Amino acid sequence: MNEDVHVFEALLKEFGKQPKFVPEPTYLELCRYPTSRFEEICTRLLCFYFDPNNEHCFYDLFLDSLLQLISTDVRISYRNDQVQVINELNSEGKRLDMLIKSPDIVIGIENKIYASVYNPLSIYSNQIALYGKKNVFKVILTVRKIISRANQKYLVFIYDFMQTIDNMTGETYDNNKLSYFFSNNTEKIDELIALYSKYNERILKVQIEGISELMTLIKLHTNDDKWWAWKGWDLGYDSFNQISGTPRIGVEASYEVLHNNPLGRFRIYITTWEIKHFVPYEDHLVALFPDCYLDKTNDGRVYMHVDVVDDNDIELIIEKLAHYHQVVYNVVSQIKEVE
C-alpha cells in the first residue's frame, strides 16, 4: 500500500506540472453555426479583416502578417487604398474562396477546415495567372495553430474567430499536454479516483454521524425541534420566519476535514437563500459582526461566515449554535418591529 501511495504522489506531482487551461465555447460555437457552411463564414470573416480599408481599424495588420508568412525572403510594398479583397472569385464556374490583389500582388486563398483539398486547384491557378501580377501567391488555409489601436468591437470578434479555429484542432487542453498525461496514466488515475471516492464516502459517513449527534443536542439545548440536517451533513435552522412578514433567513453549519480529521473543523454561517432576502437584515448583521466575511454567491445565496470551531469541541459548538440562533431570532424580531 505504501508503494501505491508513492506512485500516486508522483502522479499528482506530475499532474501539477500540466497546463490546466480548458477552452471555453466561443461565440460562433454557442451560435451553433451550420457545419456545412462554416468555411463560408470563416472566409467572409477573413475577407473583412484582410481588407485594410474596412472599419475594424487594424489597417493592414492581417495582410502584412500574411505576407510575412508567405514571402519570407522579400519585403513586398503596397498601398492600402489599392488593395482589393474578393470573396468567392468565379473561376470557370468554380469558386476560389478568396482573392487579394493590388497593382503588384495577387493572393489566391482556398479555405479548408472540414473537407480535404479536392478543389480544382489548376483552374484556380490559371485564373490567378490572368491578373499578370509580379508577386503571385497561392495559399491553402487549414486548421493548425499558427494588437494595436484597433476598434475594440472587431478585436473581440477576431479573437473569438481565432479561438473557434483553435478549438477545432481537437486539442482539449492547451498544447494537448494534459490530454497526453491523462491518456498515458489512465489506469493509475482511475484507481486514484476510486480510492479518493471511497475516502470521501468514509469522511461523509463520519460527518453525518457527527451532525446527527449535534442535532439531537441542539434541539434539547434550544428546546426547539425545528433544527434539520440537509442530506445528513448540513445542520440548519430557518424557522425564524414564523414571525410573519419577514424574508427567510437561517443558521447553517457543517464539518470540514482538518489534518485528516473528518470532524476537525466546524463552520457556522448566517444565510439567506436569495440575495434580496438578505437586504433587510444586512445592516443589522454587519453592525453586529463587522469583521465577518460576507459571501454573495452567483447562485443567489448569501453566507455570513460568523464562526469556526476546531477539534470538534462539542460543548463549545452547541454553545455557539445556540448563540447565533438567538442572535438571528433577535434581528428578525427587530425587523418586524421596524416594519
Image (tube, helix red, strand yellow):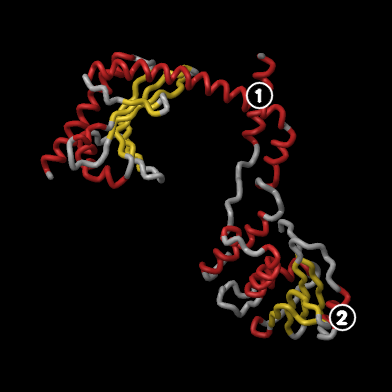
Rendered residue at 69%/22% (across/down) = 7
Relative vertical location of residue 71 with respect to residue 127 in this rendering, above or below? above
- The span from disc 2 to disc 1 (Cα, nearest Å) is 62 Å
* Residue type (three-letter) at the residue carrying disc 2: Asn
Residue 313, labelled with which disc?
none
- Is the Cβ of the residue at disc 2 closer than 8 Å to that at disc 1? no
Give me the residue at 25% from left, 45% from top. Answer: 279
Q: Which residue is mark 2?
A: 126
Give the residue displayed 61% in from the left and 22% down from the top: 195
Residue 227 sits above or below residue 210 on the image: below
Helix, strand or loop at mark 2: helix
- Report whether 129 appears left or right of 34: right
Instruction: Say which mark, if any, is on residue 8.
Output: 1
Question: Amino acid type of disc 1?
Answer: Phe
Quadrant in which the N terminus is drawn: top right
Residue 246 visible to an observer of this rendering: yes
